[in-house]
Amino acid sequence: MKIRVGHGYDVHRFAENRKLVLGGVEIPYEKGLLGHSDADVLVHAVMDSLLGAAALGDIGTHFPDTDERYRGADSMRLLTAVCMLIAENGYAISNIDATIIAQAPKLKEYIPKMRNKIADVLEIDVDCVSIKATTEEKLGFTGRLEGISAHCVSLITK
């Protein structure tokens, strides 16, 4: 059995008049994230992690922001496409471990729903999806409330 590990990272700045979507869950907050798609920074990190583990490029390769088909796209739909690509290349997703870095809003109460949504799309047990949230103690761009970032590590097998 081949075991492959991938790492994904994404960042989006806050913007007015946008919904805040993380892990496929709409979070009530005064600002959303700026991006060509729905700017779901968590799902983007998950996708890059999975694509990296399979050595299949990154989300910019598969869903370029120059392609109008992806303007405002639901990142969960894009994650479904990545999941299919992983399977088409003979891999199975074992688990993901992700961290959201955000000074605000507080995300603890939304994490269970994020885990369930991502597990459903990836067709893995929810106990194979770890999502954590942390602040940067008011340091850096996330600490200054300029945006949100996310990291993800995934394990796939063949």
Image (cartoon, rainbow, N blue to C red):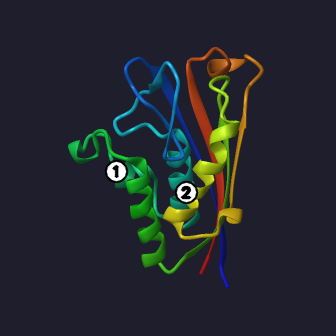
Looking at the image, residue 38 sits to the left or right of residue 103; the answer is left
- If the image is split into quadrants, where does the N terminus sit? bottom right
> Looking at the picture, how far across and down is residue 147, in whole percent?
55, 24
> Looking at the picture, how far across and down is residue 23, in whole percent?
54, 46
Looking at the image, residue 9 sits to the left or right of residue 24; the answer is right
Viewer-nearest residue: 126 or 63? 126
Residue at horizontal 54%, vertical 70%? 123
How far apart in space, not on screen, are marks 1 and 2 (Cα)? 19 Å
> Looking at the picture, how far across and down is residue 133, in whole percent?
70, 38
Residue at horizontal 59%, vertical 57%? 116
Whether residue 98 is situated above or below residue 119 in the rendered picture: above
Q: Residues within 10 Å of mark 1 (few under 14, many from 20)?
A: some
- Tally of numbered discs: 2
> Looking at the picture, how far across and down is residue 97, in whole percent?
69, 54
**In terms of sequence position, does the residue under pointer 1 or pointer 2 come before the other?**
1
In which quadrant of the rendered view does residue 151 lie?
top right
Report if residue 55 is visible in the image.
no
From the image, tell me which residue sits under label 2.
118
Q: Amino acid at mark 2?
A: Ile
Residue at horizontal 47%, vertical 76%? 87
Which numbered tag is attached to residue 71? none
Residue at the limit of the structure toward the bottom, as seen here: 1
Q: Amino acid at mark 1?
A: Phe
From the image, tell me which residue sits under label 1.
63
- Assign a secondary structure to mark 2: helix
Report if residue 124 is visible in the image.
yes
Q: Residues within 10 Å of mark 2 (few under 14, many from 20)?
A: many
Residue at horizontal 36%, vertical 55%? 62
